[in-house]
Image: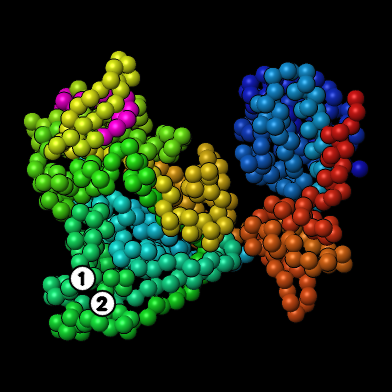
Amino acid sequence: MSRVGVFVCHCGRNIAHTVDIEKVVEKIKDVDEVIHIESNMYMCSEPGQTVLKDAINKHNLDRVVVAACSKDMHEDTFRIATKEAGLNQYLTEMANIREQCSWVHEEKDKATEKTIRIIESTIEKVKRNQPLVPYQIPVTQKALVIGGGVAGIQAALDIADAGYEVVLVEKDSTIGGKMAQLAETFPTLDCSQCILTPKMVAVGRHPNISLLTNSEVENIDGYVGSFKVRINKKPRYVIEEKCTLCDDCVSVCPVIVHDEYNVGLTPRKAIYIAFPQAVPANYIIDPNTCLGIDPLICAKCKEVCEPRAIDFDMQPEIIEEEFGAIIVATGYTPYPIESIGEYGYGTIHDVISGLEFERILAANGPTQGVIRRPSDGKIPESVVFIHCAGSRDPAKHLEYCSKICCMYATKHALQYKHLVHDGTAINFYIDVRTAGKDYEEFYKRAAEEEGVIYIRGKVSELLQDGERILVRGVNTLTSEAVELHTDLVVLATGLLPSEGTKEISNILKLSCDNKGFVKEAHPKLKPVETAIAGVFVAGTASGPKDIPETVAQASGAAAKAETILSSDFMDRDPVIAEIDENTCGVCHTCIHVCPYGAIYYDEPLNKIVVREALCEGCGSCASACPSGSIELRNSTYESISASIKALLRSG
């Protein structure tokens, strides 16, 4: 016979408003093997946990049910409290009477009856639970950071400064990401390069950081504490140790292509350095455009290179290492502006993207910071900035707000006014969203002090009208049609998950939201954790963010990674799948459905095996097994059957 204690939480009014707590207590106290029951306003509070611990000792309880919120919220909280009271933590179960009951019902009588059944069902389960012991796994005290934008840079520096080794992998030839392309940052209008470059240099020089640019993660296996990672370091065709940055190779290269750093506004050669502040500061040959690689047609750069730094025979290098923790900081990509046909991008020369305008504004950009129209090089007397270009438009484009567009469009308008004092800056907006410190003040400065014009409304059409652009739209505040001419149009496009985010999500089997961004383990309580233990997310890989939030989240992810790296061993939850070899038909169904790659076929032994360290206890294998040979510890067929019968009882 078990001695079960039941603790019902009011959760303030969250539960008590819809559920008759007193009636629940009266009903449950008569359930077989329930020795003690009481309610508390907030069970998760310190007084609430003290009540639980005191009751375990006073009534000699050997099982505990906490009827409150979801397991995701506070299961660990109550397990720890149970353990502190001297009871095995896996003899505690939570009955979810908030999300699954009080929050979804309005009729108090029915919600109360459902609450009683949920608690009775949980009692039947906990009575069949067995005491379990977490098992320990060794930890490789080295971190992998994937992505070299500001998020990856910050995370790598934080971990390295804490004394742990870090490998930072970036698929481009330099770190810096999108932030390196910005001219200034809001709301302070400080130079992007001035605040980012010192961090880039620090990464390149840090003794605890191994920087792998022009590299990609190809495969990740293993589990928290011991991830086995294969990285493909692609050849630069320039020997970094020999290159003196003399630039002789660039002048003789006959190939001219669009420069990605300047968003195609300027040309570059097939051998190039991304930008003057690039880290590492080394040239690279683009194998897709160079005439000297496979087959060797041109070798002019090699002929003029006195240090003999160019090597067309370089091959990819496969690097295999183990890591204790991984941070995914793979960034974003702008919404493809070509998809917004009504704005004429690509056909109207003076319609440009926000990122193109950034490069025009930048001192190291194609015009050295002088604002000129792409069509004729003239300084525009007026500029129209269109907010939400392709965003918040579920019918044709992105349905969501990308959070930063209002602010960077406002920043662009201010920068334009600072450079062209007599110019006219007009912002078309749906509504201005200023969610950040000093952001509202920044917007008011533009609108009230610096003469930036804001028109609430959507632009419906852009047309070339002689040398100028005809802008047609509607002012939704006055319900009047708007028609005006301008010299330049800048589109504030939204943010999409990067290709790198998609690739790494597939490799790691990370859950993604309906937009394609990496899904957090919990949006509020675990904003940098993922469903995979030991894998953390930072920056815009998990959704649109500004720079301060990105940096803060990167430091948060680094801190979480450090909690793993700081120990030689770590505990793992023992609630995992177990296979009955006597009834298993070796059909491989479980292998195919396991989302974590935790189950494999041992060919020499001809049996299916669970990798305990990889199993997350999701139960997919147990539900799919045709012979019923797989059970989760403490979620056996017997306990589940008893729980269901309690839910379906009559009367």
Residue sitting at 35 percent across and 29 percent down?
Answer: 433
Q: Label 2, on which residue?
A: 291
Q: Is residue 149 depicted above or below 110 in this figure?
A: below
Image coords of residue 308 (percent x, y): 20, 84
Image coords of residue 568 (percent x, y): 55, 65
Q: Is residue 20 left or right of residue 477?
A: right
User: What is the quadrant of residue 168 in the picture?
Assistant: bottom left
N-terminal of the two: label 2 or label 1?
1
Residue situated in front as seen by the camera: 445 or 232? 232
* Image coloring type: rainbow
The amino acid pointed to by label 2 is Leu
The amino acid pointed to by label 1 is Val
Q: Which residues are magenta?
A: 449-462
Is residue 454 found inside the magenta-colored segment of the image?
yes
User: What is the quadrant of residue 494 in the picture?
Assistant: top left
Which numbered tag is attached to residue 255?
Answer: 1
